[in-house]
Amino acid sequence: MARYIVRRLIWAFLMLIAVSGVVFILFYVFPSADPAQLRAGRQANEDQIQAIRESLGLDKSVLEQFWIYLKGVFTPLDLPGTDSHGPLYFGHSYQSNADVKDVIFSDLPATVMLTVGAVIVWMAVAIPTGIISAIRQRSLLDRSTMITTLVFISAPVFWLGLVALYLFAQDVGIFPIFPGIGSYAEADSFLSKCATMILPWLVLAAATAAIYARYLRSQMIDVMQEDYIRTARAKGLPEKRVIGKHVLRSAITPIVTLLGLDVAVLLAGNAILTETVFNIPGIGAETFNAIKRSDLPMIQGITLFGAFFIVTLNLVVDIVYAYLDPRVRYE
Amino acid sequence: MSSAPLLEIEDLKVHFTTDEGVVKAVDGLSLEVREGEMLGIVGESGSGKSVANMTILGLTRASNADITGRISFEGEDLLEMDDEELQRIRGNGISMIFQDPLSALHPFFKIGSQLVEAIQIHQDMDDGAARAHAIDLLELVGIPDADRRMGEYPHEFSGGMRQRVMIAMALTNDPKLLIADEPTTALDVTTQAQILRLIERLRKELGMAVIMITHDLGVIAEVADRVMVMYAGEVVESGTLDQIFYDPQHPYTWGLLGSLTRVDQPRLARLAQIAGQPPSLINPPSGCHFRNRCPHEFAKCTEHPLLEQRAEGGHSDRCWLPPDRKKELRVVETGEIGLEAKESAA
């Protein structure tokens, strides 16, 4: 197991280098605009642009630039002969001139809070819904639940978000049922930040809760056909224990895999729509701004960070899976 | 034959409503099992033998299942019980083991915890005592190094060892009746013999009754006291082991016997087989359900025969052929019992 993890970590590192290569090619070799021009702003003359080009190293060969970029990102310490930016140097934002790394770290708490809360909401909704639908299969309750989930899966997040704001937000909504909802950026205590998150959590969780509920339902229905569930019943186990222990234990295992990847994707900034609609200063909103302004170092940094979350959580999922399913053993 | 039977089934019908029609999986089954007795139930896939036995423990209850009749166990009617009352019987008074021991054990739980769970459902025992009991049971069914193996998962056991674990689990609460549903089908031949010998030994040691369900007459040849042959949801022949093996009355039984490889008979050029497919349980042939596969069909066969005593000594069957005609048809020159008798005689 330890050897497996070490090997996976090495692979993860190589994967990140590969991702950074792809990102580098996408944004530097096929630029949508001249980076020096973007950095210099609108009123710059040719000399200034040339000076910026040199200071950013854009006059060097592509390979050399990539090497400098890689060194900046992956050199863990300020080694002699390296630039003194510290590790994880993606460059400075063209827009604000801030270190990309610092911007990402300051955006991260909002995104983490949004993600964690949404995960709690969607699991809390999906697990009971999935179980009840599975054991009351083809009942009116099951059918109406499954239709409702279909509605939420089909509803686009930006639409759902705007509807939620229109209906429930304290300042603009017509049914302001959640008190204290305001702007995340203005909330000062943890609790008031949580209050501003209620609507975003619900909106972000809606579609995923629906998908998970349907998935859990179909998993449970499959597992209930298994011979070992018949064995559990034949032992004389009460139906509650059969479902709650024997069926759920098997049905939930693939959900864990799904969860790990969904969390990674959200941390990587995939809550762009939710963060934009609710004006939450997280990674997603930052991505939106960076793309809007062709802020290449920012986009690069966020992309590589996202790749880091996905690679890491993939590894975590695989390790957790080995504990959940004893038949899986890694060599 | 003086005491009341341990298990008594009267006119059990298990019908499932499906989109294609009503599947009559079991259609009027009656049987008795006495204490300590082994009853063999033989039939091919889809004859209703598994459904009937799962119905004893209420495992076929579903919204589309229509179950009628009476199943009396120690004087209580199991069909009248709700699920909670049945849970008291399941794994306690009546235990069951299944065909494929790999899929019958939960893959994510250790053997030990599955055994301890089975014990603690029915007995008020603390973890330590239940564990000790579980280890005793594993040793009883012949699993070496039981203490260590308690901590292993089902996939770490071989097929035969898994079936031993299933048997140990079935024995946890000293059942009066063990239902073994094709317990050896998924095992290789040498392991089959071991498992059968184990079940036979435990039956004698523990004094429990056994219903042995199989499609293979060879499995019950040594161990059953009585045998019932099922076909298309009905019993077509019922008698003692000797009656079924040495004086079979129903052409379907002849077919089953003819398809056995036997070392006490001259070797045949090829094994006899029963022509055709098992009938649809939705729309079985009118009259005798076997008649469209039977080489001896005659005019009377369009009438549905009842299970009646047509030979001596409690030996009953559902075939219209006169007893002496049966003897004539089933005995052919080489001495084997086969369905192809008519063709070779002609």
Image (spheres, rainbow, N blue to C red):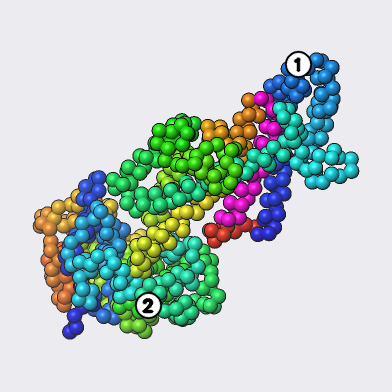
Q: For this rendering, which residue is in front, B139 or B269?
A: B139
Name the residue located 61 percent from the left edge and 52 percent from the top edge: A316
Residue neighbourhood size for the residue with mark 1, other residues' Cα within 10 Å, grouped as few (<14), some (14–19), many (≥20): few
Q: What's under tag 1, amino acid-wise?
A: Gln
**Badge number at residue B123:** 2
User: Amino acid type of disc 2?
Assistant: Gln
Q: Does dot 1 land on a helix, a strand or a loop?
A: loop
Q: Principal SS element in the magenta part?
A: helix
The range drawn in magenta is: A293-321
Q: Quadrant of residue A153?
A: top left
Quadrant of the snapshot with the C terminus of chain A = bottom right
Q: Position of residue A219 (x, y in %)?
A: 43, 50
Task: Find the distance from the CA under tag 2 to the CA under tag 1.
Answer: 86 Å
Q: Residue furthest right?
A: A80
Q: Is residue B321 left or right of residue B216?
A: left
Q: Name the mark on residue A43.
A: 1
Question: Which chain does tag 2 point to?
Answer: B
Where residue A254 sits: x, y (%)?
50, 51
A183 sits left or right of B346 in the view: right
Magenta stretch contains residue A319: yes
State yes or no: discs 2 and 1 in contact (Cβ < 8 Å). Answer: no
| Tag 2 secondary structure | loop
Residue at image position (24%, 55%) is: B65
